[in-house]
Image: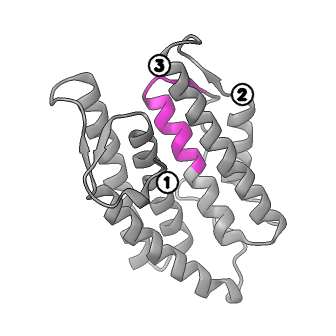
């Protein structure tokens, strides 16, 4: 079993998480979906940890953290303040896991490239939803660029965390209705 600090942060934030908008509102339902997605990926990470699969555990933890951070950025949910280290610490990925890490990292890079190129804001420019979508897209692209830098530095674990995290922000933006998908729909949870 592995022990990723990012997964510890995830568990803490989920246990403290709350939905801000009142029940019955559209935004409350968005908060329910955000918390459900983060919990589902947290459970996936726990399963990967039990299976001694640090590569998939790492990806699942950072994807779930992205949903929480995006939801907080939108003012839909609230959790304890993140206390994460960045870049993420290296999980215990042995030589036998390096091939899997490399394959998954490059696959997630391609997925994030495809996802960021498949979205357009659904709100008008200079409106709050339009600006929120632009911010989320900027986060996705920033983590795509950072992940590329980590690849060049040979830090595949940090690159995978970046790509997973950036994609989680975009996916959350899609689920909250801030984007229209103009490309590959299969890259999103719709």
* Nearer-the-camera pick, 12 or 155: 12
| Residue 13 position by quadrant | top right
Q: Which residue is drawn at 40% across and 48% down?
A: 170
Q: Residue at x 36, y 52 (%)?
A: 140
In x, y percent, where is residue 137? 30, 46
Gap in Å between the C-alphas at discs 2 and 1?
20 Å
Residue where numbered disc 1 is placed: 165
Q: Is mark 1 on a helix, strand or loop?
A: helix
**Which label number is shown at residue 16?**
2
Span of residues in magenta: 64-78
In x, y percent, where is residue 164? 50, 59
Residue 54 to residue 81: above or below: below
Gap in Å between the C-alphas at discs 3 and 1?
25 Å
Q: Is residue 83 visible?
A: no
Which is more foreground, mark 3 or mark 1? 3
**The N terminus sits in image quarter:** bottom right
């Amino acid at each position: 079993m592995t022990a990723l600090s990012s997964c510890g942060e995830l568990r803490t934030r989920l246990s403290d998480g709350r939905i801000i908008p009142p029940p019955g509102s559209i935004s409350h339902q968005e908060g329910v979906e955000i918390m459900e997605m983060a919990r589902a990926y947290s459970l996936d990470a726990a399963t990967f940890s039990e299976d001694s699969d640090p590569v998939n555990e790492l990806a699942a933890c950072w994807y779930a953290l992205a949903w929480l951070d995006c939801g907080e950025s939108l003012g839909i949910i609230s959790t304890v303040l993140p206390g994460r280290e960045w870049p993420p610490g290296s999980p215990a990925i042995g030589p036998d896991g390096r091939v899997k890490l490399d394959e998954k990292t490059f696959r997630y890079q391609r997925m994030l490239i495809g996802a960021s190129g498949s979205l357009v804001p659904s709100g008008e420019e200079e409106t709050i939803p339009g600006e929120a979508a632009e911010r989320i897209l900027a986060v996705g692209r920033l983590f795509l660029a950072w992940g590329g830098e980590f690849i060049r530095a040979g830090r595949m674990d940090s690159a995978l965390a970046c790509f997973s995290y950036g994609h989680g922000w975009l996916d959350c933006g899609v689920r909250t209705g801030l984007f229209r998908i103009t490309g590959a729909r299969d890259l999103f949870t719709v």
